[in-house]
Amino acid sequence: MVAMRSKLGLIVVALAIVYVVWGSTYLAIRVVVKEMPPLVGMGSRFLLASAVLAVILKLRGVDLRVTRAELAGSALLGLMLPFLGNGLVAVGEDHGAPSGVAALLVAAVPIWVTLYRFLSGDRPRRWSVVGVLLGFVGLAWLVLGGRGAGDVPLLGASLVLVASSFWAFGSWVQPRLTLPRNSFVITVHEMWTGGALMISAGLLRGETVSPGSYGVHTWIAWGYLVLVGSVVAFSAYVWLLGNAPIGLVATYAYVNPVVAVFLGWLILSEPVTSAVVIGGLVIVAAVAIVITVERPRDRDEAPALEPEAA
């Protein structure tokens, strides 16, 4: 009984971490890109996070060596998830996409995954199709509805939406790749390859680095993304996958956006317009439908629903 209560307590703590921390990463990204270039800033974040996680794993005796095929698979995930997924979110927020709106757009990842399954020849259930269609209606309303004061910048929102489609594709293709068995080892190689690609792309697009000119808030937000957003929250997520019902774990997909919208409004005074409220509610409802309908059949594919902030 004591052991069960202890485990239940750990589940609650881990869920709270995933709910709040991953929901808050969009706010932290928005703070960082106000001064730091988006691709170089996020790329350096992932490089350092991978180094920290690698040290922790080595101290625990985990072998980080991988085969060429496993490294190639991890690098492809690094391209799709940290680089094109997280990197384009940062670029989108740099182009004015509010952090709360970015979170709502990224919440559509399970909807994109279902669409990729359909295009690959799989036939999702009828309610999954309803969820996908409803989700795209919500996305359209979020970005286009009620244009006027407080509207969402189209370029920034489009970049974030493209980012979510890449993140979903990487998540969908992950079970089909040759990867290390240990999820944490995958993460180390995924983060350093994705980080290196991001920094290279940032330098090629002319991003310049001036560490001495960044304020304290920028460095605090960047450090938060490295240690708390990447290392702590991801560790909690992986632990939950092995210790909690997947239906419970999957609830982060529609809790994170709520947390992000609230924090964006509270801290950055981001406007919560009727388009954000209505579009956001429709997207969250669509994601809930997709997750609920697909969960029994696709239990082993739970990591495909992993969010932006790994």
Image (cartoon, rainbow, N blue to C red):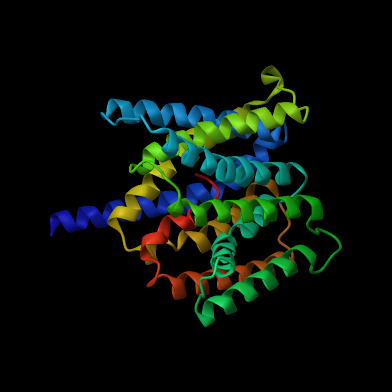
The answer, for residue 36, to whether it is visible in the render is no
Residue 63 found in image quarter: top left
Quarter of the image with the N terminus in it: bottom left
Q: In the shown orientation, is residue 17 left or right of residue 182?
A: right
Q: In the shown orientation, is residue 5 left or right of residue 197?
A: left
Q: Nearer the viewer, residue 110 or 274?
A: 110
From this view, report whether residue 208 is shown above or below residue 197: above
Residue 202 found in image quarter: top right
Residue 133, percent across and down? 64, 75
The answer, for residue 15, to whether it is visible in the render is yes
Q: Nearer the viewer, residue 294 or 142?
A: 294
From this view, report whether residue 19 is shown above or below residue 111: above
Residue 16, percent across and down? 41, 53
Residue 140, percent across and down? 74, 68
Q: Nearer the viewer, residue 49 or 12?
A: 49
Q: In the shown orientation, is residue 150 left or right of residue 100?
A: right
Q: In the shown orientation, is residue 189 left or right of residue 107?
A: left
Residue 267, percent across and down? 64, 46
From this view, report whether residue 125 is shown above or below residue 226: below
Residue at 45% across / 53% down in the picture? 176
Residue at 75% across / 54% down in the picture? 158
Q: How many marks?
A: 0
Q: Residue furthest left?
A: 1
